Amino acid sequence: MVIQELKPSKHVEGRWLAVLEDGSILRIGEGEVVDFALYAGRELSDEEAERLQEAARRGEWKRKAIELLMRKPQSRKELGRKLLEWEASQEEAEAICDRLEELGYLNEAEYAGRIVRHYAAKGFGERKLRDELYRRGVPRELWDEALGQIEDNSEAINAFLEKKLKGSRDPKEIKRASDALARRGYGWEEISAALERYREERSWDE
């Protein structure tokens, strides 16, 4: 198979377009141009053409993975699933994830911390944070370090109770607020302490 034309892409920096004699176009990176010694008029054996097409597919998956990580950080598990959706094999997906970890694009420890800070800032408790780390496929060995970034959440719980209760003493309202905090991932000890602070600030008993 002969490369009829080889030209840089006008839309994606670092990408080259190899126009083959059958009219098909391979979108390849600069690395493939060098590795395969490509130029217009170059004749590829069937084996070379197949290897070049495989390299082009891997390069495209890698490029898409980097673009995704730049837009929206992912766990390795999430990125692996996405690569499989793009029709990469399991082995190819693992190799790409390995390479992106080496390059620093894929950083699960940083991603775990980002998740924890994001949901803690929204007023969610540790159980919810753990659920979110699990849902996103973050390895468990990274959880404790990420959760250690949480500052004292008493102010967040106090603010939640103030907003929900507005000074109310109604036991039903207090029960609803307590249940809402539990759904947000707070433990009973945290909720109980917050309710005690709420009562003390108003100097009234149940």
Image: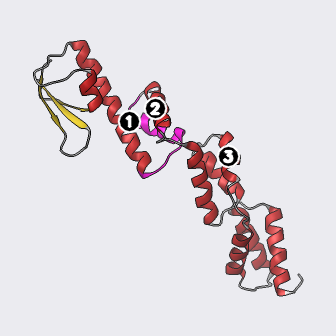
Judging by the rendered image, the residue that carries numbered circle 1 is 62
Q: Position of residue 181 (x, y in %)?
A: 72, 67
User: Which mark is nearer the camera, 1 or 2?
Assistant: 2
- Secondary element at image label 3: helix
- The quarter of the picture where residue 168 lies is bottom right
On the image, the x and y values in percent for residue 46 come to 22, 13
**Dot 3 corresponds to which residue?**
143
Q: Looking at the picture, how far across and down is residue 60, in whole percent? A: 32, 35
Cβ–Cβ below 8 Å for labels 2 and 3? no
Residue beneath the point at 26% across and 32% down: 30
Looking at the image, residue 100 sits to the left or right of residue 179; the answer is: left
Q: How many angstroms separate mark 3 from mark 1 (CA)? A: 27 Å
Query: What amino acid does circle 2 point to?
Result: Arg
- Looking at the image, residue 109 lies above or below residue 182: above
Q: Is residue 47 above or below residue 187?
A: above
Q: Residue at x 43, y 27 (%)?
A: 92
How crowded pointer 2 is (Cα within 10 Å; few <14, some 14-19, many 20+) is rated as some
Q: Residue at point 80% right, 65% down?
A: 190
Q: Is residue 178 magenta?
A: no
Foreground tag (2 vs 3): 2
Q: What span is in magenta?
A: 71-88
Left or right: where 183 falls relative to 89: right
Residue beneath disc 2: 99
